[in-house]
Image (cartoon, rainbow, N blue to C red):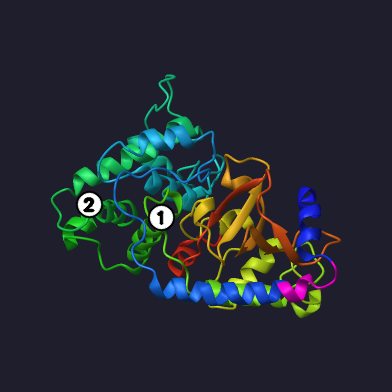
Amino acid sequence: MGDGWTMRKMWIGAGVAVALGMGFVMLLVVGVYLVAGNGAGGAGGGAKRLAKGSVPAAYQPIVQKWGNLCPAINPALLAAQLYQESGFNPRARSAAAAQGIAQFIPGTWATHGIDGDGDGDRDVWDPADAIPSAASYDCSLASYVKDVPGDPTENMLASYNAGAYAVIKYQGVPPYKETQNYVRVITTLEKSFAAPTGRVDPSEQAAGAIAYAQKKLGTPYLWGGTGTAEQGGRFDCSGLTRAAYESVGIELPRVANDQYNAGPHPGREELLPGDLVFFSDDLTNSRAIRHVGIYVGGGYMIDAPRTGAVIRFDPIDTPDYFGATRVTEDGAKALPTTV
């Protein structure tokens, strides 16, 4: 954030900026509550497009193409599945012997794996085969349960988790807690991977998160810091944002690149106080995000920037600005604990 040093001195210089900044933030806090109280609508319908950088650039064209294979899926839904299954890690391997970016078990791969890139082989470790295979398998499951009442996508996801027989038997999502949770998680995460098609509702918890962060202004940065007493109440960047939202009852993941998936992604011109703002040296890949702050308005955020610095106001309009997330309680709850 070195490029913002001159701007920051101009804005918070002369020894009075922190006091002025707090008054500024308090006005914004009130504004967030007013906007949240008057909010209506949200992301509309229409074809789903992937949110900026939400899928690593190497896989985005494949997800976009194969996510439109049948009406029961879309690119954002397919991305949400891949993220939950492996965190887009093509070498992922589970204790249950699931393999690759789409986490196929060998028996399922033998039946449903396809040669997605047309190179003559079916390789579960190759995303060019595994991602198309995941889409194809989803569509096969959807065809098995096409006559079952209810939402075809939810029935397909339930089939993926519990088997098509269970969905047919119960004529919809079966009454299994694990399966119902799986359907809820994927359909919620879908919103994080989809580019918004309309106005994104503000978070009512945003004002409280800002209020928490502003109380930490001036606190020295600590790599790995989460604000514990043993750490002297110090934070790193994602430790601060996590604690700020935890103070209003929303539990975020520990690291910044997973926090990006805690809700939909407003554009730069749509930012509201309380949005998380992210920074990366690779603007095509949310998994490469390395910094996060809490937007407070006027082009500024509160963040814990680096070793040797303190929690402070910084500008967000820098070359490494990646994008933003409007945190939602459902979005945060849907995130897997490990990816």
Looking at numbered disc 2 in the image, what kind of residue is underneath it? Pro
Q: For residue 250, say whether it is visible.
A: no
Q: Is residue 19 magenta?
A: yes
Determine the residue positioned at 29% across, 47% down. Answer: 46
Instruction: Compute the Cα span from label 2 to label 1.
Output: 17 Å
Determine the residue positioned at 30% across, 36% down. Answer: 69
Q: Nearer the viewer, residue 236 or 97?
A: 236
- SS class, disc 2: helix
Sort mark 2 into few (<14), some (14-19) or many (20+) by Cα contacts within 10 Å: many
Query: Left or right: 171 with respect to 202?
Result: left
Query: Left or right: 222 with respect to 250?
Result: right
What is the quadrant of residue 233 in the picture?
Answer: bottom right
Query: Left or right: 81 with respect to 151?
Result: right
Examine the rendered structure and indicate whether residue 235 appears above or below residue 277: below
Looking at numbered disc 1 in the image, what kind of residue is underneath it? Lys
Query: Left or right: 90 with respect to 214?
Result: left
Q: Nearer the viewer, residue 164 or 292?
A: 292
Q: For residue 299, say whether it is visible.
A: yes
- The range drawn in magenta is 14-20
Q: Nearer the viewer, residue 236 or 124?
A: 236
Examine the rendered structure and indicate whether residue 83 appears above or below residue 248: above
Residue holding disc 2: 152
Mark number, residue 231? none
Determine the residue positioned at 17% across, 60% down. Answer: 169
**Residue 6: image x %, image y %?**
81, 53
Mark with earlier residue (2, 1)? 2
Mark number, residue 191? 1
Q: How many marks?
A: 2
What is the quadrant of residue 104 in the picture?
Answer: top left
Examine the rendered structure and indicate whether residue 57 appears above or below residue 262: above
**Residue 117: image x %, image y %?**
42, 24
